[in-house]
Image: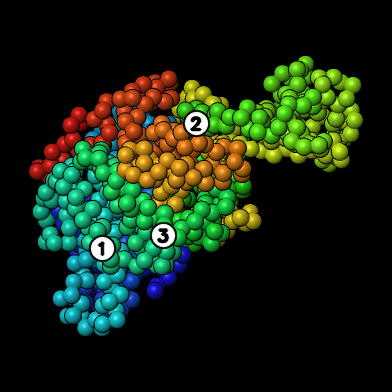
């Protein structure tokens, strides 16, 4: 099998020819005519041309043109940097939710978060164009790989068999883009490889028609796809096919008005049983070496990036540079500077409050003792009374506590006659010793061993709460000011040892984007169960707790099966999957996106307000409505 992803190369002239031959009609997204001197016969003289074409289909999500980072854009008339597929996908899934807000004042970008976009919004058009560009090159690949054309070129049996696998993968990629199309735009123009090449007006199809088409496509290609986890990393396989089917079925109520949670459960279970596994550390999933640091075992379908070979200003380069600003140190993120753009709202920050029942955890340690914590980090500061510790054994005490940045000491029976501090900050306690520093606000487990005068302080907070707060305000009074709103430290262009990614300049990153990963399937299982799709509460709780144990580093955040509710799952999906391009679709499925959910600056006001239900889908871009008189605009626009 070919290795195309970390060393992505494709012939510019060859790709240009494919684009010139493959597009039809009505508007800019279907009207690219690059200049090339290659003929079709010359392009396919080299047997490798088929794998190169396949590489370009995959790369359509990651790159924005035929040479990086800019210079020969796929789509004319729009900025090559911001029009990248994944960059626009992320903006359309995150910027209009409680998870993200942007400081830049580029065109109509704030209309997304403010829920006041129109059919003339250039970002909505950029996403639409990207989707149809991707569908267009997929269609052309399929036109160029019919049995008739392969036979006319004298393609041998071995290559012909491999091309059949390529074709199944391209159909998956087209299905992925058609899913994005119906999710964003509802009723859409519909074109396949069976449509003739040339100028015509693509017919607009109802959302449920395209939904049924995608589902059938995926079922048709399932037996043709390479087995789950058996293909080259980064290429679609049966696991990716099952995951996309599960996504479609779980959202079926939105797309078609029919609940298909039981069908979703069938394919979720296939994914879970396919041999994927969680990586040990949540943060490793978003590092430069996430293709080799163990995270690859959790990935079901990643979008691959390489700082030397897939250069551009979208994808994970955008997701690493754009959130860095203020007092943040760009070098910590393996980049040469931040763009001071995206951060989050207080609604998302509050997702991480009150997730742990400290009283229950402390009761499980043992009986209350006379030892306690006192200090500016504790709830009652230096005046007391002390925060009571619990006896776990002879001379052994512990407490789960919510502390703030400051100092503390151990004290016996609320009396200064017996107090312990740490002179030298070496982990050993001395009577009347120095105050012990608590560096930052958070949840902690603190142990005390009076037999050998030692102690430990261990963070027990949710490590997914990856906020940078120094000189950042929780409240957003000015949405154009990067310091308003907590920053999010999720994507880092360094490996597990802190080494920078392959691009020494710090411009472009190596981080693969997790389009689908196992943690998502675990949460989908719990949701499908709660929606009546089968499965069991106990198994759902096990899957959720696997994620929470990883996040907390202990069982401190574990839940009971009785804690499972749809509201909990929506929040847990945000905690686990934030900034991974799920939030808008999730909020719509839970009926919290428009007429119910409220967060800062939604509706263009600081406190936020609800928006119109019709905004659950975007408008067809006005440019396409004008170009294709057969199209009907979505209601409300």
CA–CA distance between discs 2 and 3?
Answer: 31 Å
Q: In the figure, residue 468 lies in which quadrant? A: top right
Residue occupied by mark 1: 221
Q: Residue at x 32, y 39 (%)?
A: 532
Comparing 497 with 341, the one in front is: 497
Q: Tag on residue 274?
A: 3
Comparing 588 with 402, the one in front is: 402
Q: Which of marks 1 and 3 is in front?
A: 3
Circle 2 sits in a helix, a strand or a loop, which is it?
helix
Is 40 displayed left or right of 53 in the figure? left
Circle 3 sits in a helix, a strand or a loop, which is it?
loop
Q: In the figure, residue 270 lies in which quadrant? A: bottom left
Give the image location of residue 18, x and y in percent. Answer: 24, 66
Crowding at dot 2, Cα within 10 Å, few <14 / some 14-19 / many 20+, comes out as some
The mark that comes first in sequence, 1 or 2, is: 1
CA–CA distance between discs 1 and 2?
Answer: 39 Å
Is 575 displayed left or right of 446 in the figure? left
**Count of residue discs:** 3
Q: Can residue 438 be seen in this view?
A: no
Quadrant where the N terminus sits is bottom left
Q: Which residue is drawn at 50% across and 36% down?
A: 560
Circle 1 sits in a helix, a strand or a loop, which is it?
helix
Comparing 319 with 75, the one in front is: 319
Q: Residue at x 75, y 17 (%)?
A: 385
Q: Which colour scheme is used?
A: rainbow
The mark that comes first in sequence, 2 or 3, is: 3
Q: Are marks 1 and 3 in contact (CB under 8 Å)?
A: no
Is 135 displayed left or right of 516 in the figure? left
Give the image location of residue 235, x and y in percent. Answer: 38, 63
Q: Are marks 1 and 2 in contact (CB under 8 Å)?
A: no
Q: Which residue is drawn at 77% across and 37% down?
A: 393
Residue occupied by mark 2: 351
């Amino acid at each position: 099998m070919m290795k195309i992803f970390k060393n992505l190369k494709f012939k510019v002239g060859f790709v240009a020819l494919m684009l010139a031959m493959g597009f039809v009609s009505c508007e800019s997204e279907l009207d690219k005519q690059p200049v090339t001197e290659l003929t079709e016969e010359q392009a396919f003289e080299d047997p490798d041309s088929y794998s190169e074409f396949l590489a370009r289909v995959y790369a359509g999500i990651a790159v924005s043109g035929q040479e990086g980072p800019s210079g020969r854009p796929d789509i004319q008339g729009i900025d090559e940097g911001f029009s990248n597929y994944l960059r626009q996908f992320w903006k359309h899934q995150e910027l209009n939710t409680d998870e993200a807000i942007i400081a830049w004042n580029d065109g109509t970008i704030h209309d997304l978060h403010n829920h006041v976009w129109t059919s003339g919004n250039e970002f909505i058009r950029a996403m639409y164009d990207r989707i149809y560009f991707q569908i267009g090159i997929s269609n052309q690949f399929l036109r160029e790989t019919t049995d008739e054309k392969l036979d006319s070129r004298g393609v041998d049996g071995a290559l012909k068999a491999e091309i059949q696998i390529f074709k199944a993968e391209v159909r998956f990629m087209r299905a992925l883009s058609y899913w994005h199309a119906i999710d964003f735009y509802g009723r859409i123009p519909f074109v396949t490889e069976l449509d003739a090449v040339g100028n015509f007006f693509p017919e607009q199809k109802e959302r449920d028609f395209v939904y049924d088409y995608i589902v059938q496509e995926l079922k048709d290609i399932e037996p043709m796809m390479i087995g789950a986890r058996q293909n080259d990393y980064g290429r679609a396989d049966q696991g990716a096919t099952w995951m996309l089917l599960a996504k479609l079925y779980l959202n079926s109520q939105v797309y078609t008005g029919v609940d298909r949670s039981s069908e979703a459960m069938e394919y979720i279970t296939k994914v879970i049983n396919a041999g994927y596994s969680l990586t040990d550390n949540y943060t490793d999933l978003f590092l430069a070496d996430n293709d080799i640091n163990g995270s690859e075992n959790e990935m079901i379908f990643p979008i691959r990036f390489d700082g030397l070979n897939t250069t551009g200003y979208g994808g994970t380069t955008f997701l690493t540079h754009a959130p860095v600003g203020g007092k943040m140190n760009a070098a910590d993120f393996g980049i040469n500077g931040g763009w001071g753009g995206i951060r989050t709202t207080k609604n998302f920050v509050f997702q991480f409050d009150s997730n742990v029942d400290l009283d229950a955890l402390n009761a499980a340690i043992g009986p209350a003792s006379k030892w306690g914590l006192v200090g500016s980090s504790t709830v009652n500061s230096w005046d007391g009374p002390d925060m009571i510790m619990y006896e776990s054994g002879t001379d052994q005490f512990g407490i789960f506590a919510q502390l703030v940045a400051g100092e503390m000491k151990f004290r016996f029976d609320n009396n200064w006659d017996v107090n312990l501090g740490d002179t030298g900050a070496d982990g050993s306690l001395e009577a009347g010793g120095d105050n012990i520093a608590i560096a930052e606000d958070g949840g902690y487990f603190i142990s005390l061993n009076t037999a050998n005068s030692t102690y430990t302080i261990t963070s027990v907070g949710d490590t997914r709460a990856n906020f940078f707060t120094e000189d950042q305000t929780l409240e957003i009074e000015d949405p154009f000011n990067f310091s308003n709103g907590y920053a999010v430290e999720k994507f880092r262009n360094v490996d597990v040892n802190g080494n920078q990614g392959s691009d020494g300049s710090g411009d472009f990153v190596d981080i693969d984007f997790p389009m689908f990963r196992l943690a998502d399937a675990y949460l989908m299982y719990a949701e499908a169960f709660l929606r009546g799709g089968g499965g069991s509460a106990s198994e759902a709780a096990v899957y959720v707790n696997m994620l929470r144990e990883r996040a907390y580093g202990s069982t401190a955040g574990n839940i009971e099966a009785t804690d499972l509710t749809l509201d909990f799952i929506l929040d847990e999906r945000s905690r686990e999957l934030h900034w991974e391009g799920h939030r808008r679709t999730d909020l719509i499925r839970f009926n919290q996106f428009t007429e119910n959910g409220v967060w800062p600056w939604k509706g263009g006001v600081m406190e936020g307000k609800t928006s119109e239900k019709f905004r659950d889908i975007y408008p067809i871009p006005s440019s396409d409505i004008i170009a294709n008189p057969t199209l009907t605009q979505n209601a409300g626009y």
